[in-house]
Amino acid sequence: MSILIDKDTSFIIQGITGREAVNLTRENLDYGARIIGGVTPGRAGRDIYGVKVYDCVRDVVKHEGQPYGSIVSVPPRFTKDAVFEALENDIKLIVIVTENIPRREVAQMVELANLRGARIIGPNCLGMISPGEAKMGGVGGPAANTRQAYTKGNIGVMSRSGGMTTEIASTLTAAGLGQSTCVSIGGDAIVGTTYAELMPFFEDDPATEAIAIYSEPGGRMEAELAEWIAKNNSRLPVVAFMAGRFMDEMQGMRFGHAGTIVEGKEDTTADKIQRMEAAGISVAERIEEIPELIKQRLAEKK
Amino acid sequence: MRFYEYESKALFEKRGLPLGPRHLVTSADEARAKAAEIGGSVVLKSQVLSGGRMKAGAVKFADTPDEAAAHFEAILPIEVRGEKPHSILVESKSPIAQEYYVAVTWDGRNKKPVVIFSDMGGIDIEEVAETHPEHVSKTNFSSLLPITPRLAKEAIGAATVSGSDLNKLTPIVFELMKIFLEYDLTLAEINPLARLEDGSFAVLDGHIDMEAEARGSHKALLKELGIGDDETRQARPPTPFEIEGAKVNAVDHRGVAGNVVEFDGDLGLVIGAGGGSLTLFDAVRKHGGKPANYCEIGGNPSQSKAKNLTKLILSKPGVDKIAVMMNVVSNTRVDIVARGVIAGCIEAGRDPSEAIAIFRIPGAWEEEGFKILEKYGVDYCDRSVSMYDAAGRAVAKMQAGS
């Protein structure tokens, strides 16, 4: 089992003829994804690795049937329109790869998604993977590299960094711990789906036995997760790695992702670590401690 | 991107919010003349981007034009958190009857804008929220659906305000909500928003932060306010080293090799990507290493970008070695980065096997990359060596060499 996606999940790629999207198409197809069409306005009739290109989402639906999801890989100034187009064509799961989208537009996309009963992952993310089943997004890169780092198993992974999603999965794999689903949630200040919003999915997934997360300075997402864990008496042990500890001393500077800026006390890693530990989350100092901490927590449960 | 107070006020005035007479001055004579023109008591305020002006003594009150000129001289040399004043604002000072606080910002949890209102303005709002929670209201509103003034009225009323103040404040708060959305702001704050003794309202101090990503959509406003395209408005101005780093990244659009931030250590870092850089920077420091810089490479940068970044970092005085490290890469090619950093060492007149303390980039095209590194005798490792341990190897070499 897995969350959000499995081998039967159908999706399209908006902006499919772009350089990055062409690579994405190839990598996802090679990993077994069901990509039923692509969209680039004015490019109808082309095909990308056998995937037919249409001018608009409506035409994909008409000719190929209703897709469940979409990967949006278009330039920032066209992203909101593309996401609205997906939502108004009944697409229920949208991965936004694009970065540098202003918060107002992200908030508007999220509001419309909520009104339409759909879910957004990202922006500024590499999507997600249910190892051995399917992947949707650039996470893990080419299929051969993806198979090397990710293996099927029982650990759910959530990460504000796309690259660190793979580093953590690779470390878990090396320690004999496979993954149920790994989600790169995006590095922006506002993202479609936060850790706390993914927790109920993992909680309901019989395959998931523990959670590993990558977190960093900025925002309230870790505080929100800590509150969720404390309130919901979660069955899942959670182990978090906190990066960017050096930023606590550097208020107002921006390092890494757009969402990392430290503006107040609650944005600091010290505050986040304290809140997470108080909620029973184990906080690792190094990535390589994650597998051992997970094994300990699982052993304590039995 | 933060606005100076005088810029924030210019935008507020443009949108019809109430402001007193004021002038931006750059000399003591000008301060004297403008204080006389305004008449009565005035306040002189240092124009800096960081907070804490009052504590630093960079805000002073004057009853006469001569006093204003003297205060100008006193404020001008004062640095606020290391920042020299851009200019000084001379503004009319009127007797205050009541101070309010209003701000609009993003609520990352609800993913909506939030208007924060209090009838205990003028002081630190976080403190008020803790000590007098009933006097602070937080009201979310939609960024998608149309908004109307009732949202502002509810926000004000929820902080225990009624009567004629409620009715007079509603259009001001509502306008601030609209300004926030229209200009892609991340913060629009008025503190204090005052009712003066004559019954009128005035914006006494204001702060605006605009989303850097949205600058392109608001060129007309930025031009009107006199904010240049090259003004980064970061917490501190970029160093020449950082400006060179930005140039390296701007050469082509293939991937990222930039976000260079200068530090005063001796170990050069060629690291990536977004989250990996934060992790590796921490790891170097935890081992007792002293980074000479922060940077980010990722998104499969061209070989020449990796080369130029390496050259730049090795050119920094005091930098003897670099550590080239990333998390397991997905779309960045290991061999391209390896070729780039080796070429960078050679062009800088350095032997790659000496200059590169460690190369730890596992992932796509690693076999090809490792072959190249071996040829040049560079110390490298694969994913079986953790990011933390790789950083430790680099720091150990620095310590052995010194």
Image: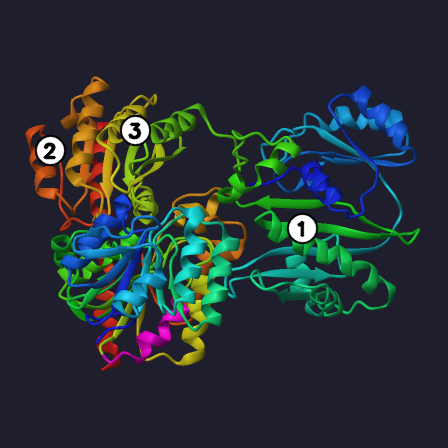
For the point 58% across and 32% down, which residue is it?
Answer: B82
Where is the N terminus of chain A found, in terms of image quarters? Answer: bottom left
User: Residue B366 or A94: which is nearer the viewer?
Assistant: A94
Chain name for mark 2: B
Where is the C terminus of chain A found, in terms of image quarters? Answer: bottom left
Indicate which disc residue B189 carries. Answer: 1
Discs 3 and 2 share one subunit:
yes
Which three-letter amino acid code belongs to the residue tagged 2?
A: Leu
As helix, strand or loop, the secondary structure at mark 1 comes to strand
Which three-letter amino acid code belongs to the residue tagged 1?
A: Glu
CA–CA distance in space, label 3 to label 2: 18 Å
Residue A42 x %, y %:
33, 48
For the point 51% across and 42% down, which residue is it?
Answer: B212
Quarter residue B47 falls in:
top right
Q: Nearer the viewer, mark 2 or mark 1?
A: 1
- For mark 2, what is the residue? B373
Chain name for mark 3: B
Q: Earlier in the sequence, mark 3 or mark 1?
A: 1
User: Residue B287 or A120: which is nearer the viewer?
Assistant: A120
Q: Earlier in the sequence, mark 2 or mark 1?
A: 1
Residue sitting at the far top? B349
Q: Is residue B105 left or right of residue B268?
A: right
Quick check: is B314 in the magenta stretch?
Answer: no
How many residues crowd around disc 3 within 10 Å: few (fewer than 14), some, or many (20 or more)?
Answer: many
Q: Earlier in the sequence, mark 3 or mark 2?
A: 3
Magenta stretch, main secondary structure class: helix
The scheme the figure's colours follow is rainbow
- For mark 3, what is the residue? B309
Q: Which residues are magenta?
A: A194-206
